[in-house]
Amino acid sequence: MDKPFRRRDLLGIRNLSAGEIVGILNTAENFREINQREIKKVPTLRGKTVINLFFENSTRTRTSFELAAKRLSADAVNISVSSSSVTKGETLVDTAMNLDAMQPDCIVVRHGSAGVPHQLAKVSKAAIVNAGDGANEHPTQALLDAMTIREHKGKIDGLEVAIIGDILHSRVARSNIHLLTKLGAKVRVAGPKTLVPNDFAHLVENDLQVSEHIEDAIDGADVVMILRIQKERQDSAFFPTLREYSIHYGLTNERLDLARKDAIVLHPGPMNRGIEISSDVADSSRSLILDQVKYGVAVRMAVLYLATGGTAISE
Amino acid sequence: MGDTICREDMADQYGLVEKSKIMDAARMKRALSRLASEIVEENQGAKDLYIVGIRRRGVPLAEKIVEKILQLEGERPLYGIIDITLYRDDLSTVGANPIVNRTELTADIENKKIILVDDVLYTGRTIRAALDQLMDFGRPNRVQLAVLIDRGKEHRELPIQADYIGKTVPTKRTEIVKVMLKEYDDDESVWIYEKSAD
């Protein structure tokens, strides 16, 4: 190959334009059909290598990226922290340079600290895809959420979206807030004051509605997005007990009745049934949790295609 | 390609010089009618026929052939669309990734008589990609190729020939054959352009 490898990183939603986001979503729409085929494989990324570098545990996201790569005929290698040399004292940059020396075309990275994918993007020749960095961003999750919303609502512009739970620590919330507001939705966030600081109102250009009561956010909403309560936070005094959280912020059918009649419910998983979402709601027809997982593969196929193939389509 | 193009754009945007018109709307219509009757003659009717248009300009042509076969036989053949982007052999060399469109083969292709339809047969590489994709969907009984324009065997880079040809047009490499369709363009005609000297 005499042409330079042109890379296209996906580090977050914040730095994408509305047109670029729609471009990725449209591409993903067209990849969906492959996942319905009898032979779920196309030769598009034959000979390309994708490394899934996961410093945090994740079953769903890693599997989703791995399937996406494999269905495009790329070779996918998974590296998880427990078996990596990071535990042996290697620095992040050294790890990246070593992986780079093996000539991967794309590195999908998840890390507990914000900014790690951005750091890797500076040193690596491969395209870097952020699969979640600390509390910063989780762009492919926001894209698959957007795809689910578009599929069921036909649009994103003008929708009222409530995001409930631990907004403070949630990269899913940040990526979603950026994406949804860029595409013209109005976002309301609600949760305990400790987890939903007032500053959040100013995260994006058009202010968000921030409230302490779940009812305020859900009232009249088209989409209700529930975040996972990380049980590990229970000890850090953000909220008194899981039981109390569940009483005040758990999504029940009664609370969901405040939303529009055709409102849909999203959850990035894994769910804590009976804590942030009741089993009744989770298993109802309004809950699109498995659709989210389904569309996740198509979104990641589109992202890998755009990241490894050359310049992205903008519109 | 792919976007709506009017004839003036060909010259202005792509530096192409209009050389000659080789088909007008009436001739295109007659050629497609003939292709449709040849297809039903060769396959003894519309039974098990599956007409598959190759995106983009093969799609409206395939639709027209389906309508013609319906008129001739009183039976509508199966119809589908193939997008070959993901099966291209030049993905690593083309500058920008081509836009991926959707393949729509809703009916099972197993044991069917597939007629691939495209506007122009040139190097044969598009057809190779379409064939590869088709095989990923199953095992058709037979695959045949129908094209509106065949640019001639001397340009072929693969051993691929058309079974049904609207018109054979010997061309030079520097020339471009453009099939204009009212679904995408401002005209219904076939033109030869040549890359301008500068």
Image: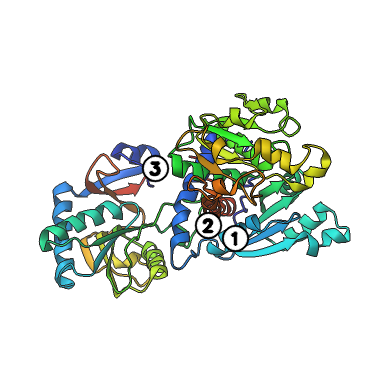
* Residue displayed at 15% across by 62% down: B75
Q: Which residue is mark 1?
A: A1
Give the Cα separation between the discs numbered 2 and 3. Answer: 20 Å
Give the Cα separation between the discs numbered 1 and 2. Answer: 8 Å
Are callouts 2 and 3 both on one chain? yes
Tell me the chain of label 2: B
Q: Is residue A144 visible?
A: no
Are the residues tagged 2 and 3 within 8 Å (C-beta)? no
Q: Which residue is mark 3?
A: B14
**Left or right for A14, reference B129:** right
Identify the element where label 2 is drawn: loop
**Left or right for A130, reference A265:** right
Q: Position of residue B46 (x, y in %)?
A: 18, 67
**Left or right for B122, reference A52:** left
The one of B92 and A56 positioned closer to us in this rendering: A56
Label 2 Cα crowd, 10 Å radius (few <14 / some 14-19 / many 20+): few
Give the Cα separation between the discs numbered 1 and 3. Answer: 27 Å
Does A295 appear above or below A104?
above
Q: Which residue is mark 2?
A: B93
Q: Position of residue B57 (x, y in %)?
A: 31, 52
Q: Amino acid at mark 2?
A: Thr
Figure colour scheme:
rainbow
Label 3 Cα crowd, 10 Å radius (few <14 / some 14-19 / many 20+): few
Does A172 appear above or below B23?
above
